[in-house]
Image: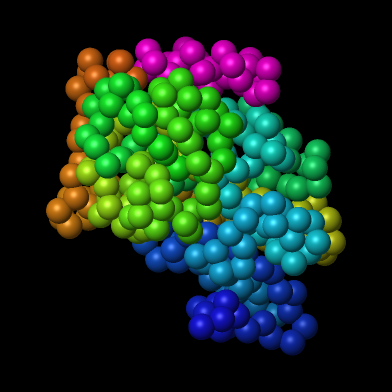
Amino acid sequence: MSAASVSAQSNPACDPGELEMVFSHVTAAVGHPKGEAATALADRINADLNGQACMTVYPNSELYADDDELFQAMLDGEVHFAAPSLAKMSPIVPQAQLFDLPFLFDNMEELIDFTYTPEGESILEAASLNGYLGLGYWLNGMREMSATVPIRRPEDVQGLTFRLSGSPVGEVYYDMLGVETITMSFSKVYDALATGEVDGQENSWSNIYTKSFYTVQDGVTETNHGVLAYMLFTSEAFMDSLDPGLRAELEQIILEVTHERNGFAYQLADVNRNLILQDGGVIRTLNDEERQAWVDALLPVWDQFEDAIGADLIQAASGRAAGL
């Protein structure tokens, strides 16, 4: 089935005279926080802006799996909205690498608190330097590790090959752990795990469950070593082309949907974690001593990215996380 026909079933065709907005993403449309947030956004736009604008959503990499192509398509006006992981935004917004620093946030509550600070807002604003416009942060969950062998301590992953999404920070900390990394698109991860092209990966509970990664791994270790979140963004040229009234309505809808769906992401992470267990998947939790071994091994990564991210941003995020 073509991308156009799939999306036409879930997003009715625009009425004559309506401005069509295209949203492209790589995840499942159902059962995944980003996919469901994109659908919720389209539903609100198609209801509240009926007669003015409509949104069509293309999930599961139907339009673009390659980030470079997506970024260019947005500048070319072929795509109007997307929400790549913050790791994938680093070529456009180097400061976004902050969110990939290991053990910066202990939980999603700390992350969402930071996104509402002036420092968190400044990262969204930095996208404008390259012709884009950051609109908000969409949450997924904490990052966990899985592999073909049990993982409890840093030395357990030495010599393995892990898939990465393209995070420069991840490349450094896995190199410190003695892990070889291969960058590949999200749509290719399951096959790479199933065939043994890679031994392991890191991801959220929602990603691990909806793409069945746990079924081709020895188990998943609840490391909570990082966060997985997305930057909802568009192009400045597109937003500037809108009638001021329409733009204001659109921005308000985005704000409301973002707040609502981020709250739902917490619940969905827990649901998907439990579904893995119900399906016979193995989940390993770390005791305090094991977790501290990971913290000690990975915290030196922070210093290597001070120049690219900004020491002030790291301090603002780490200070807030520590309750300082």
Residue 110 lies, with reference to residue 185, above or below; the image says above
Apparent side of residue 24 relative to residue 272 in the rendered image (left or right): right
The scheme the figure's colours follow is rainbow
**Numbered label tally:** 0
**Side of 226 where 63 appears, left or right:** right
- Evaluate whether residue 305 shows in this view: yes
Q: Percent from the top left, x then y, of residue 117?
A: 59, 29
Q: Quadrant of residue 54?
A: bottom right
Q: Nearer the viewer, residue 68 or 271?
A: 68
Q: Is residue 62 above or below residue 69?
A: below
Residue at point 73% right, 35% down? 126
Residue stretch in magenta = 295-324
Name the magenta segment's main secondary structure.
Answer: helix
Q: Residue at x 43, y 19 (%)?
A: 298
Q: Can residue 315 be seen in the rendering of this structure?
A: no
The residue drawn where x is 59% and y is 52% is 83
Which sits in the foreground, 236 or 174?
174
The x, y position of residue 29, in whole percent, is 45, 66
**Is residue 301 on the magenta stretch?**
yes
Residues 141 and 157: in front is 157
Q: Is residue 107 left or right of residue 305?
A: left
Residue 177 image position (x, y, % from top left): 41, 22
Q: Position of residue 125 (x, y in %)?
A: 72, 37
Residue 211 on the magenta span: no
Position of 265 relative to 54 (above/below) = above
